[in-house]
Image: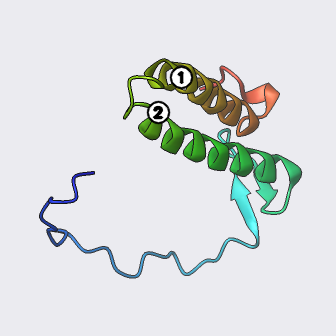
């Protein structure tokens, strides 16, 4: 991000986004099945997503220096694999290819 970039107010403000139905402590997988938010599968793909974000930050830093630019390419491949892993974790085996 450019430090000299001018900040602009968003042209559309999103206020009060909710359905008034609650989520009963559950979240949906890709196929629509609902699991408790504290389910191991949900914890796993949340952790994988966080790791992917850290790897992304490392890519940005690695691209700043010619000595580490090759590492940035390797880290991008790691990000790709982490994205695939997150997708697998967010989809039950019986739903793979069903959509």
Q: Residue at the location (43% across, 75% down)?
A: 17
| 25 with respect to 84 (left or right) | right
Judge left or right: residue 53 versus residue 88: left
- Identify the residue at the far right of this view: 40
Q: Earlier in the sequence, mark 2 or mark 1?
A: 2
As rendered, which of 89 and 53 lies closer to the eye? 53
Question: Looking at the picture, does residue 12 appear above or below residue 94?
Answer: below
Rendered view: 28 above or below 58: below
User: Which label belongs to residue 34?
Assistant: none
User: Which numbered disc covers residue 71?
Assistant: 1
Image point (45%, 23%), residue name: 67
Query: Which quadrant would residue 82 be assigned to in this image?
Result: top right
Q: Are marks 2 and 1 in contact (CB under 8 Å)?
A: yes
Picture coordinates of residue 40, whole percent (x, y): 87, 51
How far across and down, in percent of the image, does residue 9 sit?
A: 16, 72
Residue at the disc numbered 2: 62
Left or right: 69 as drawn, with respect to 30:
left
The x, y position of residue 31, in whole percent, is: 68, 38
Tell me the element at label 2.
helix
Packing grade of label 2 (10 A; few <14, some 14-19, many >=20) is some
Which of 85/67 is in front?
67
Residue shown at 40%/30% (left/top)? 63
Say above or below: 57 vs 24: above
């Amino acid at each position: 991000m450019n430090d000299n970039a001018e900040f602009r107010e968003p042209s559309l403000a999103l206020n009060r986004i909710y359905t008034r139905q609650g989520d009963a402590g559950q979240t949906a997988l890709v196929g629509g099945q609902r699991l408790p938010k504290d389910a191991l599968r949900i914890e796993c793909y949340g952790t994988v997503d966080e790791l992917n974000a850290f790897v992304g930050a490392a890519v940005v830093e690695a691209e700043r220096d010619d000595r580490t630019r090759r590492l940035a390419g390797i880290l991008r491949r790691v990000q790709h694999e982490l994205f695939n892993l997150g997708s697998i974790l967010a989809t039950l085996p019986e739903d793979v290819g069903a959509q």
